[in-house]
Image: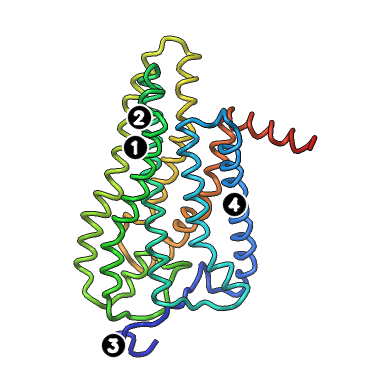
C-alpha cells in the first residue's frame, strides 16, 4: 500500500496461513475439519455438563466455561480463513480488525484465569477434601468465573486504546491469519514504546506470569499432599483427579511461551503463525479430548446419553 506511512489505514488484508495457491484447498479442509472437531467436542462437553446432574460440580462448571472459551476463540480466529476461501475476500476493516484483536485477547486472558480457578479447585479437592463442598460452593464458583471474565475484558482495554491511536502503518497487509497483537505492532510505524512497555509490564507480568504462578503454585501443595498418601492406589487416584487439568495447562503455556516470548523478527512472524494456529485451533480441539479420554465421569455420562439416543 503506497503512502501507508502517511495516512491512517481504513482496512487490512489478511495474508493467511500460506500464500501458496497449491496449499489453499488443503489448508481450508484442515481448518474446517479442526473447527468442526472443536465445535463437536466442546458442545458435547457443554451438553453433558448441563444435562447430567452427576457433573454439576465445580470442576465441570469451570470445564464448561473453558469449552465456551474454546468455541469462541476458534470462531473468532478461524472464521476469516474459512470465509476468505469461500468468498475470496481477504479484506477486513480497520475497526473490525481491532475488535477481533480485542475479543481474542480477552478470551485468551479469560482462559488463563479460568485454568487458574480450576487449579485452585483441584488444590481444595486434594488438600482439603473434607471442606471441599463448603469452600467450593456454588456462589464461590460463580464469583470466580465472573471475576475471570470481567478482569479479562477490562485488562485488554488499554491495549485497544493505544492501538486505536496508531496513525501510520508500513503496510496494510497482515502476515497472519487474524489480527493478532504482534503482527499489528510489527506493521506500525507510529511510536510503539508505550505499548511495548505496557506489554512488558502488564501483559507479561500481570496477564501471563501472575496466572502462571497462581496456576502452578497449588500443584506444589498438591504434589506434596499426594506424596504423603500411604497407598499407591490412593496416590494414583489423587493424581488422576488433576492430571487432565495439568495436561491442558502445560500444553497451553508451552505454546504461549513459543509464540510470544521470542524476539520479533521476519522469521519469527512466520513461525508464530504455526504456534498461533496450534494455540487457536489445535488446543481447543484437544481440550475436550483430554478431559473425556482421561475422565471416567465424562465417559460414563457420554455412554449414558448415547444409550438413551439409541433407544429414543
Crowding near pointer 4: few (<14 within 10 Å), some, many (20+)?
Answer: many
Q: Earlier in the sequence, mark 4 or mark 2?
A: 4
Which element is circle 3 on? Answer: loop
Residue at 46%, 10% (x, y): give it: 231
Which element is circle 1 on? Answer: helix
The nearer-to-camera label among 1 and 4 is: 4
Q: Which residue is mark 3?
A: 6
Crowding near pointer 1: few (<14 within 10 Å), some, many (20+)?
Answer: many
Circles 2 and 1: CB atoms closer than 8 Å? yes
Measured Cα–Cα span from mark 4 to mark 2: 30 Å
The nearer-to-camera label among 4 and 2 is: 4
Q: Earlier in the sequence, mark 3 or mark 4?
A: 3
Residue 239 position (above or below residue 278): above
The answer to whether 131 appears left or right of 176 in the picture is left
Q: What is the residue that sits farthest to the front in this orientation?
A: 139
Res 215 label: 1
Image coords of residue 17 (percent x, y): 51, 67
Measured Cα–Cα span from mark 1 to mark 4: 26 Å
Q: Earlier in the sequence, mark 3 or mark 1?
A: 3
Q: Which residue is mark 4?
A: 39
Q: Earlier in the sequence, mark 1 or mark 4?
A: 4
Circles 1 and 4: CB atoms closer than 8 Å? no
Residue at 50%, 50% (x, y): give it: 70
Residue 56 position (above or below residue 256): above
The nearer-to-camera label among 3 and 4 is: 4
The answer to whether 77 appears left or right of 82 in the picture is left
Given residues 44 and 24, the one toward you in this image is 44
Circles 3 and 4: CB atoms closer than 8 Å? no
Amino acid at each position: 500500500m503506497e503512502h501507508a506511512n502517511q495516512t491512517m489505514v481504513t482496512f487490512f488484508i489478511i495474508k493467511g496461513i500460506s500464500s501458496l495457491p497449491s496449499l489453499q484447498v488443503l489448508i481450508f479442509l484442515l481448518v474446517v475439519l479442526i473447527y468442526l472437531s472443536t465445535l463437536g467436542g466442546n458442545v458435547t462437553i457443554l451438553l453433558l455438563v448441563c444435562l447430567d446432574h452427576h457433573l454439576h460440580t465445580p470442576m465441570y462448571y469451570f470445564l464448561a466455561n473453558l469449552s465456551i472459551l474454546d468455541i469462541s476463540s476458534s470462531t473468532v480466529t478461524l472464521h476469516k480463513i474459512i470465509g476468505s476461501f469461500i468468498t475470496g475476500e481477504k479484506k477486513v476493516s480497520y475497526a473490525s480488525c481491532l475488535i477481533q484483536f480485542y475479543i481474542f485477547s480477552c478470551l485468551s486472558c479469560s482462559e488463563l484465569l479460568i485454568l487458574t480457578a480450576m487449579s485452585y479447585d483441584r488444590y481444595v479437592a486434594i488438600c482439603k477434601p473434607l471442606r471441599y463442598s463448603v469452600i467450593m460452593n456454588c456462589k464461590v464458583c460463580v464469583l470466580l468465573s465472573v471475576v475471570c471474565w470481567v478482569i479479562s475484558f477490562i485488562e485488554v482495554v488499554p491495549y485497544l486504546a493505544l492501538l486505536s491511536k496508531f496513525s501510520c502503518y508500513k503496510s496494510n497487509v497482515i502476515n497472519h491469519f487474524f489480527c493478532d497483537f504482534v503482527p499489528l505492532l510489527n506493521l506500525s510505524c507510529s511510536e510503539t514504546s508505550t505499548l511495548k512497555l505496557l506489554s512488558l509490564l502488564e501483559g507479561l507480568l500481570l496477564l501471563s506470569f501472575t496466572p502462571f504462578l497462581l496456576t502452578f503454585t497449588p500443584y506444589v501443595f498438591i504434589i506434596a499432599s499426594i506424596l504423603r498418601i500411604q497407598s499407591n492406589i490412593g496416590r494414583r487416584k489423587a493424581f488422576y483427579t488433576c492430571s487432565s487439568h495439568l495436561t491442558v495447562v502445560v500444553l497451553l503455556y508451552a505454546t504461549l511461551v513459543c509464540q510470544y516470548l521470542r524476539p520479533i523478527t521476519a522469521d519469527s512472524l512466520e513461525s508464530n503463525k504455526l504456534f498461533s494456529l496450534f494455540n487457536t485451533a489445535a488446543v481447543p480441539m484437544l481440550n475436550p479430548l483430554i478431559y473425556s479420554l482421561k475422565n471416567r465421569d465424562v465417559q460414563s455420562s457420554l455412554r449414558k446419553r448415547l444409550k438413551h439416543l439409541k433407544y429414543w
